[in-house]
């Protein structure tokens, strides 16, 4: 299973490399998209439905860790020195005058 994960990681790396190489050339991007679509159709015609696996599974494979069931976003902590920089800066300017 570890060898498969390495191959998948390498494949993702190659895909990202190809995309970054072609990103400034729309014709190259279109050609790459056609190749990917053709390969996807080939997988689907073989009956390999794992090609249409959910994004969570793809992320787990790519990152080699499970996708969390729930994500909690907390409010940011309030700054205790809000506005202090302005007062300090103002005092320096007054001192130099």
Image (cartoon, rainbow, N blue to C red):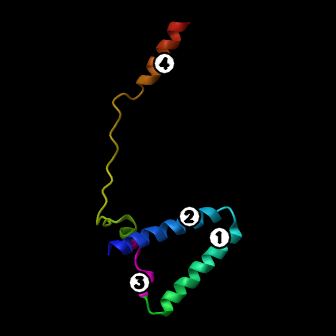
Instruction: Say which label, 2 or 3, has the lower sequence index.
Output: 2
Q: Residue at x 51, y 10 (%)?
A: 94
Mark nearer the viewer, 2 or 1: 2
Q: Identify the element where label 4 is drawn.
A: helix
* Percent coordinates x, y for residue 90 in the rendering: 49, 16
List the residue tagged with mark 3: 50
* Percent coordinates x, y for residue 81 in the rendering: 36, 27
81, 62: nearer the viewer: 62
Instruction: Say which label, 4 or 3, has the lower sequence index.
Output: 3
The range drawn in magenta is: 49-58
Q: Few, some or many C-alpha atoms within 10 Å of disc 2 (few <14, some 14-19, many ≥20)?
A: few
Q: Quadrant of the N terminus?
A: bottom left
Residue at the far front: name it: 3
Find out whether the residues at labels 4 and 2 contact each other: C-beta distance under 8 Å. no
Determine the CA span between mark 3 and mark 1: 25 Å
86, 22: nearer the viewer: 22
List the residue tagged with mark 2: 17
Determine the CA span between mark 4 and mark 1: 51 Å
Instruction: Say which label, 2 or 1, has the lower sequence index.
Output: 2
Q: Few, some or many C-alpha atoms within 10 Å of disc 4 (few <14, some 14-19, many ≥20)?
A: few
Mark nearer the viewer, 4 or 3: 3
Residue 91 is marked as none
Q: Is residue 23 left or right of residue 78?
A: right
Residue 89 is marked as 4
Camera sees residue 64: yes
List the residue tagged with mark 1: 29
Instruction: Say which label, 3 or 1, has the lower sequence index.
Output: 1
């Amino acid at each position: 299973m570890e060898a498969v994960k390495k191959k998948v990681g390498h494949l993702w790396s190659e895909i990202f490399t190809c995309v970054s190489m072609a990103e400034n050339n729309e014709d190259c991007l279109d050609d790459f998209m056609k190749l990917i679509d053709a390969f996807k159709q080939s997988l689907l015609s073989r009956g390999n439905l794992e090609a249409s696996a959910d994004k969570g599974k793809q992320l787990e494979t790519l990152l080699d860790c499970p996708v969390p069931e729930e994500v909690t976003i907390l409010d940011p902590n309030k700054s205790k020195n809000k506005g202090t920089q302005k007062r300090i800066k103002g005092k320096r300017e007054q001192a130099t005058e």
